[in-house]
Amino acid sequence: MRSPVREIYSDRDGDLWAGTNGEGLLRFKDRAVHMFTKQAGLPSNIPMAVLSRHDGSLWVGTNCGGLSVLQNQRFRVYNEKDGLSNSCVWSLAEDQKHILWIGTWGGGLFRFVNGQFTHISKRQSLAGDVVRGIQVAQDNSLWIATDGGVSHLTNGKFHNYTTDDGLSSIRVLAVYQGRLDRNWAGTSLGIDRLLGERLVS
């Protein structure tokens, strides 16, 4: 394999998954390597996000290829015809209520429940429509990395953090909640930590 790796993920069984930039999805299991590509039904050979859900199912977001779930060694794909109006899936998360959250490049955020997609974008106060990362917090709220800052979604309402709140850049690439519920944001200009209601570089 010579392609750059875009995503590394360890599932509930301890298997390691690697999403490549053009050669598909690799699974490392018991020293064996299995490659999943478009020939196995993956809609794109550029996986951007991998998630093992509570029921053990494996979900994959691909670069403008939609959302896929691995079933019997084949992929079932969700895209525009299924209600996912932006198929450039860059981030995935599952909350404590088993709701699947999908972050897209340019299409904002989607909520997936019982086979139905609900679209959430800047029109609903999301900070930006490029969603690179989603973190489920201990209290089941969501921290969302966007191209317009950090969005914190609690009980259906957004609180957004921008440079006015100390964020080093509104171009947020990753969010993370660490020990003692400490929240972090990785931006194009560095790493910020939330202290109270402000971010500190």
Image (cartoon, rainbow, N blue to C red):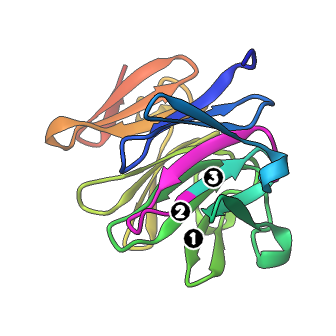
Is 57 a magenta residue?
yes
Vertical placement of residue 45 versus 187, above or below: below
Q: Say whether marks 2 and 1 touch (CB < 8 Å).
A: yes
Q: CA distance from mark 3 to mark 2?
A: 12 Å
Q: Secondary structure at mark 2?
A: strand
Give the mark nearer the N terminus: 1 vs 3.
Answer: 3
Q: How many marks?
A: 3
Res. 102 in view: yes
Please provide percent x and percent y for residue 106.
76, 50
Tell me which segment is drawn in magenta: 43-58
Mark 1 vs mark 3, CA separation in Å: 15 Å
Residue in view at x 43 percent, y 38 percent = 175
Residue 111's disc number: 1
Q: Which residue is found at the position 58% from the left and 57% from the top?
A: 59
**Mark 2: which amino acid?**
Trp
Crowding at mark 1 (Cα within 10 Å: few <14, some 14-19, many 20+): some
The residue mark sitting in front, 3 or 2, is 3
| Res 101 label | 2
The location of residue 108, given as percent across then percent down, is 67, 57
48 w.r.t. 31: above or below? below
Residue 77, image x, y percentages: 75, 65
Left or right: residue 113 versus residue 130 is left
> Of helix, strand and loop, which one carries label 3?
strand
Q: Is residue 29 left or right of residue 34?
A: left
Amino acid type indicated by mark 3: Val
Q: Earlier in the sequence, mark 3 or mark 2?
A: 3
Residue carrying label 3: 60
Q: Residues within 10 Å of mark 3 (few under 14, many from 20)?
A: many
Q: Residue at x 41, y 21 (%)?
A: 191
Q: Position of residue 83 (x, y in %)?
A: 77, 76
